[in-house]
Image: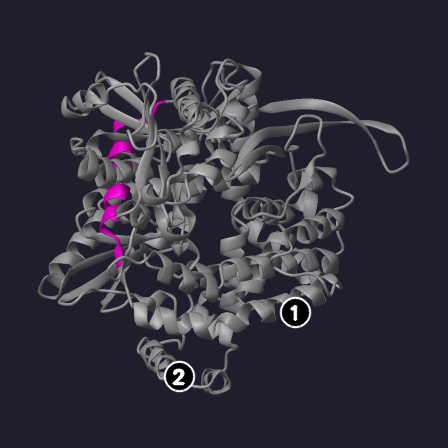
Amino acid sequence: MSRSIAFADSETRSPIDVTQVGAYKYAAHPETEALVWSWAIDDGEPRIWSPDWAWSGNCHDLSELYLHIRDGGYFVAWNAYFDRWIWNRVMVEKYAAPYLPLEQVLCAQAQAEANNLPGKLEKAAECLQVDHKKDPQGARLIKLLSVGCRADWEPEHGIAERMGRFRRYCASDVLAMRDIWQCTRPLMQNEWREYHASERVNDRGVMVDVDFAEAARDYAQAEAADINGQLATVTDDPRMTLSHHARKAAWLYEQLWPSEELQEVCTKPPKEKDGPTRKSCDRPTREAVLELLSQPGYADLFHVEHRDRIIEFLELIEAGNSSAVRKFDAICRMEVGGRVYGQYSFNGAGQTGRFSSRGIQIHNLIRAPLVKGEPDAALDAMELILGGEAPDKLEGRYGLPLSRLLARLIRPTFIAKDGHTLIWADYDQIEGRTLPWLAGTPGAELKLDLYRKGIDTYKVAAAEIFGVDYTQIGDDSSERQIGKVAELALGFGGAVGAFSAMGRGYGVHVRESDAKRIVELWRAANQWVVEFWDVLWQAAIGAYKSPGVWHSAGRVRYIYQPQIMHGTLICQLPSGRWLVYPQFRHERIEEEDERGRLVTRVVTTFVRSFGSGHGRIPLWYGMLAENITQATAADLLRNALVSVDDIAVLHTHDEIVCEVRTGTKKAGSNQLRAAMTEIPDWAAGLPATVSVDSGPYYTK
């Protein structure tokens, strides 16, 4: 990367809240203003600029930054989507700045998250222990100075104690960001192409049915009350609610005893030095606890009923936080001219490099249709809601509680604009195909041959579990459903807990003894994956024991570099991309057993980053298998997105949605299918297929 780099950060002022309306709408508001810009060219000292109306002191001239942009220099910012739009909508329109092309913009947050660092600048700096830290007083200054507009700016805001501190805060962000950028693995050119493709999708936005979203939001107000009632029942606490965060965190922490490691996941560092640690039940914490509870070593610590109670509690909170009322409300708050923008964060799931979703949280839309096999049933229900149909009549007609009914109507709220249609394609069982391809053994090839021949692997799994012929398993049978759950739940080392947790989502409920037998039979029939788990583990531990030496495992390889981020285990994927496990440890520890005796055991851990921080968690072979599978599947989707970034409007972990003119639907379908099935050279032999559909609105 030979071009010079401007590390830049902005502080703004607006009468609207960016956390509520999103960066695109915030930047487009006519009263949104820039209060401070700070930048540093390459290794130079930071410069600071403020408009005359907000600061009467000395400022650096913006001409240096203007010239840098005109000369094609790179512009690096943390969450660059925000700063890019502030530049192009505020600085260009109000201060005659040159337009900033997307291709010159790189995102320091995306690079940090690719290195498994937190998505928040201050947390990434803390985790990496860089020289410069984010000023902790910044949040207070933002509350004081960033709410309002130019017309209500008070003269006392401009004094050095306030605005001067704010300017220094902005400069400290630039220094911290540059430190992080310079000591993390640079992204490859193809990764930046994928980033720019995702940003084009963010900039294009997607059309939404605003009238329906507003009507549905009104209906959905009852949903939160219903979930609060269920939470109170599950926890035996009548005061438990979705909004009582401290209460939720305390309950979860207590229920995870006797696992101190699980409890540690639920704690955050103190806000102030020497202050008390804090308990957390935020989304990253819930995801981490659910993941760990699926692992045998943790699941077996609890009785089945107790474990299920914890899981139900976590799932209720997730249902409330990603509920219909929140999504419809987000659509209404964020739409601009009937479209919503900026919904994706590149590398947001830093552990694997998958995209994450912000705002409406498109990645966790419910997949189930309102009525199976009848996509137009959604339109009928939407018409009834727009017409004011009584909630009890809606529930009676569709046989669903109102909250679930509305949740199944979020997807068709995304529509094509007039004269256009939506086309979507999703990979068929992509993780089930990717895992054996990564193993690359004769046994794994036999598994891949089933996909190549179009054989239903769920039926094959069911036949092996029940000891019957493949032809005896019906398409809609309960046996096939059990086979499906086994295939989806057990490939990453999961056992009874993983099978039971996955089964709940598919209506499969079996006794613990039966689940144990299913796990044993599935593993016996898929010995290739059991062997691959061991190969992965031996490669990872072997790499740790011989730093600087690559150790192969199937189509991936591991190396341990003690000088990177305080000792990092690195996995190189077939695409060449890295997965990283910072501060990796494989060590013997002494602890007391239940009888008070000192025992020695080996623990393997690394520091995993969550959205709001980081914490040390166990690493095991199942996580290694899951990470490389999801990451390789993400590489396929990222590669495909580059080929359709001129028409793509939405995407999830295994699906891309495009908007094309109605008359070009066939050509658009062919373009999308080709993009997703023309496998790159590094993935030769992976039998990827897709299912393509289309319509005026997005559905299943």
Which amino acid, mark 1? Answer: Gly
Q: Which mark is residue 590?
A: none
Q: Is residue 323 visible?
A: yes
Farthest front residue? 155
Q: Secondary structure at mark 1?
A: helix
Q: Which residue is mark 1?
A: 229
Q: Is residue 190 magenta?
A: yes
Q: Residue furthest left?
A: 663
Q: Quadrant of residue 362?
A: bottom left
Rendering coords of residue 282 (x, y %): 58, 47
Magenta residue span: 186-206
Q: Position of residue 580 (x, y in %)?
A: 47, 28
The amino acid at mark 2 is: Gly
Residue 443 forms part of the magenta stretch: no
Q: Which residue is mark 2?
A: 388
**Mark nearer the N terminus (1 vs 2):** 1
Task: Report the residue at 19% width, 64% height from top.
Answer: 417
Colour approach in the figure: one colour
**Above or below, 451 relative to 129:** below
655 vs 368, left or right, is left
Query: How far from the left and from the top, in percent, is residue 397?
Result: 45, 86
Contact (Cβ within 8 Å) of mark 1 with mark 2: no
Quarter of the figure that contains the N terminus: top left
Q: Position of residue 660 (x, y in %)?
A: 15, 59
Of residue 514 and residue 222, the one placed in the foreground of this image is 222
Magenta residues, dominant SS class: helix
Residue drawn at 54 percent across, 57 percent down: 486
Measured along the vertical axis of the image, is residue 660 above or below residue 83? below
374 horizontally vs 530: left or right: left
Residues packed near mark 2 inside 10 Å, few (<14), some (14 to 19) or many (20 plus): few
Q: Quadrant of the C terminus?
A: bottom left
